[in-house]
Amino acid sequence: MTTETMPSAGAPTSSRPAPAWRHQHILDLDNFGRDEIEAVLDTADSMREILDRRIARVPALRGRTVVNLFYEPSTRTRASFELAGKALGADVISLTAAMSSVQKGESLIDTVRTLRAMRADVIVMRHSSAGAAYLAAEHTDASIINAGDGAHAHPTQALLDLYTMRQHFGDLAGKRVVMVGDISHSRVARSDMWGLTALGARVVVCGPPTLLPRGLRASERPAHAESALPPVTVETDIERAIEGAHIVMALRLQSERQQGGLLPSVGEYARRYQVTAQRLARAHPDHILMHPGPKNEGVEIAADVATGDRSIIEEQVTNGVAVRMALLYLLAGYAPGDVDGGSR
Amino acid sequence: MPEQPGVAAEPHALLLDEAAVRRAVNRLAHEVVEANGGTEGLVLVGIRRRGATLAERLANAIATFEGTRPDCGALDVTLHRDDFAQRGLRSAPLPSDLPRIDGRSVVLVDDVLYTGRTVRAALDALNDFGRPNVVRLAVLVDRGHRELPIRADMVGKNIPTSPGDDVRVLLEEVDGRDAVLVVSRGGVQ
Amino acid sequence: MSTLAIHNARVIDPGLGRDGIADVVIVDGRISRVGPDEGSAVIDADRIDATGLVVTPGFVDLHTHLREPGFTYKETIRTGTAAAAAGGFTTVCAMPNTNPPLDSRAAIESVLREAETATVRVLPIGCITRGRAGAELAPAGELQAAGAVALSDDGDAVADPSLMRHALEYSTAFGLPISQHCEDPSLVRDGHMHEGWVATRMGLRGRPASAEETMVARDIALAELSGAHLHIAHVSSAGSVALIRAARARGAHVTAEVTPHHLVLTHEEVAFGFGADYTHLRYNTDAKVNPPLREHSDVAALRAALRDGVIEAIATDHAPHARMDKEIEFDVAAAGISGLETAFGLCMTLVTEGDLDLPLLIERLTIGPVRAWQLDRQPGLEGLGTLAPGAVADIAILDPATRWTVEPARFLSMGRNTPLGGRELTGQVVATIAAGRVVHRLESVAAL
């Protein structure tokens, strides 16, 4: 026996040390640190490779059940989670709970408990009420993934956005990211703000004053609540907002905003806030253009730029499955107080 | 937290030194070519992480005495393991990177063969990439204690161990030096 | 003849300007004498040793939802008045948003009949508009004749300015206060909490303070036009305070109440709870209330207004709800806080934080509300809110120093909907006497 000094970072079996992960649920990105976001994005890189295989399926989550519980219609997000779950070998069940406002509220907790009793390990939930995923998470030990709750959050879409941005720019620290449009009603914008600022990006939100929520400007919050919202810059002038931007994201404008008296007309909105080639000329020369979709060409985004070479809208859809696989995988590995052990 | 504690403070014995590792790798390289009857159609697929490093070394060694370097690939089996539920997030999955394997002669390469579960996962994963004509297994160390009906076709060194021991292969590219150690884990027995 | 003597208490009776150690003697349900050593002379009495405790007139609540008839799964007159007694309240004014609403003589009478066997006095409030529909006036004269002490459509505002004008004008014939829930419906539509940075964090639509302020301003103008008595229910914003202050300075007959929760809690309660940690978001429906909890600056303005008398009454807006009304998505959850049993302890925060002294707090819980609505002019209520000889013996016995933890599961109210569960409060109601009868006492107080 010798007792010479040995390299101590020995991790003989592993490709890479275990990712930083401490989440049972994914409700929003407001409680994600930089290391955790990077763990998701790194894992998503590995998942992308699987999707390129002839048989794009691994058995990592065999025997686990993922339930898609959608109280609002969605094709893209739901399909994305279905493909992600199946690619990891999980059983995936999709439920569309058509729901009138009268039924609303009556059965969410019961439904979640029933699904858990039926051995759902992960419940992917979309709901029109802000906080619905939080309510579910309080009443089950299954993992809840918030796939959109009212105007509050859409963390998996935000992670997809971050993944796509990182593919283009590598490190996002110091990058100027501009979100243009209906910030008030955008759950994607809210989650993006948390994720982007956690990665060190400089975030600018821009829209007409009637579509900007109160409190985003630090001056609208008391000093003690400075950290209660992500540090973003608020602009009402799109030309100024877009100046030097690396990433421009056009948010979908719902036509209800006109009926609700928030906008004089969709036409005026388009004139003042549409992302156009002319306006993008002010952006950084290497800028990219994103849209969380589905997009209204000619309203928030000009048709020529939406399909132009700076637009990475299609790519975003492709990356969605990989990011959601990463999340399902990481959640399945969540174990509070997990101890190392096991054999090769 | 590192996946396994550092061994600096643990009692351990040196089983193969640098020269012995080099000899074992060279012997394996010859056996691989021998078994394949040359380098025609040969693909070396290393299991990440040290298996992949070994596969590169084997390919280099073969190149020196055969004149042609066989194709190499790296396979990550994290997502194919059958003990995810027990082990949880012990390591992050990495992308696999394989050349075409259809109709070719694949040699799976790993550093240590123990329970056989990693190899089973690797065989499983290979299926998703294509259908090789033949798959063989080459390992630097076989330490026994199989839990599945799997055996290596080519072995650098057979090392009888007790289940409480931990065999560590160190490779220069990863660990800064070449060696094979056995670390006694008191109390694991 | 039955006699009860309370010995050696600090008697605080702001209506009569008394604050000092005294005995209180109750004979046949009425106050007989209050003064030093008065109790010792009484023979053959039940005795309560209140050494170290504070004795005050029973609290008077201008704003209580008893939920009966119609919503007895949330609360009943029996459970609501038991909760009132546990909170030191001996008079509660029952809001008429029941089913059916209290917009008719028969409805008022049925509540009063049910209240005959209740733990504490119930004074019904009638509707301003028929069916609370905001379209036609309810029969104010008939409601008053049946026993209504005020009119309110609380839960909703009377939105139509012309109708509100007529309601105020019409009420002058009867001297009935009109208690208005001031929130402009079009400004709070789809809003579920205070509009501000917390709502933005939570992705919820807000109810801006201006929704309250515009209606307070409008109704003050209408009250001045008609000379009527306008009472602003549950004032929640600094802007409303300023409007009321100015109106009163002009001599308008405007009174106002504030709830314990608006005096202490802010909108942060909804998302972060006690001991704010901004990384962990919650959607706490138990802190959902209308008007919503607002900002620190509003709390400060409300405390100042309460101190200087611009707001003369603390009212609980006790709004009990069943679990199924609250344990659901935030936007569809019912608004309201079950407040009777925590009112005194929560209000004591203002005393411990130096905003009010104890006698002034007692004033705002007793004679303050009585004077606001001139309730002591009602037949049988002479001396209400005081310990005047001859008055009905309604008394609260308080320990202002005890620390206790709020346990909603132990509430006597059926509504356990409070954001204060688990929180430690200072100041507890030790016992309550209604019409000479001990209707509440803490088990832990052996001396009683």
Image (cartoon, helix red, strand yellow):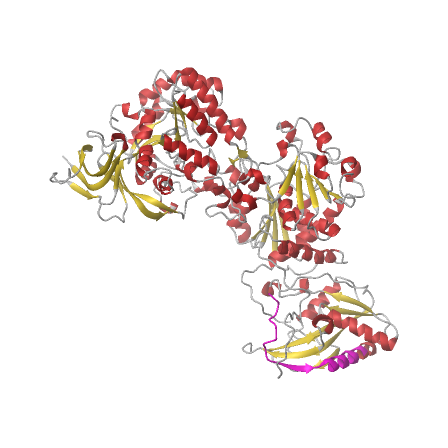
Instruction: Report the residue at 66% width, 55% height from top.
Output: A38
Count all numbered tags in the image, as a single digit: 0
Residue A204 placement (x, y as % from top left): 67, 41
> Would you say C222 lies left or right of B117 here?
left
Q: Which residues are magenta?
A: B1-29
Residue, far bottom = A1
Residue A189 is covered by the magenta coloring: no
User: Looking at the image, is C415 positioned above or below residue C140?
Assistant: below
Indicate the quadrant containing the N terminus of chain A: top left, top right, bottom left or bottom right.
Answer: bottom right
In this view, the residue in front, C241 or A14, is C241
Indicate the quadrant containing the C terminus of chain A: top left, top right, bottom left or bottom right.
Answer: bottom right
Residue B10 is covered by the magenta coloring: yes
Residue C365 placement (x, y as % from top left): 33, 34
User: Looking at the image, is A15 positioned above or below residue C61?
Assistant: below
**Residue A330 is at least partly visible in this image:** yes
**Residue C64 is at least partly visible in this image:** no
Residue C60 placement (x, y as % from top left): 32, 32
Please tell me in which quadrant of the rendered image residue A334 appears.
bottom right
> Would you say B129 lies left or right of C436 here?
right
Residue, far right = B67
Instruction: Report the residue at 78% width, 38% height from top.
Output: A281
Residue B174 placement (x, y as % from top left): 71, 70
In this view, the residue in front, C431 or A129, is C431
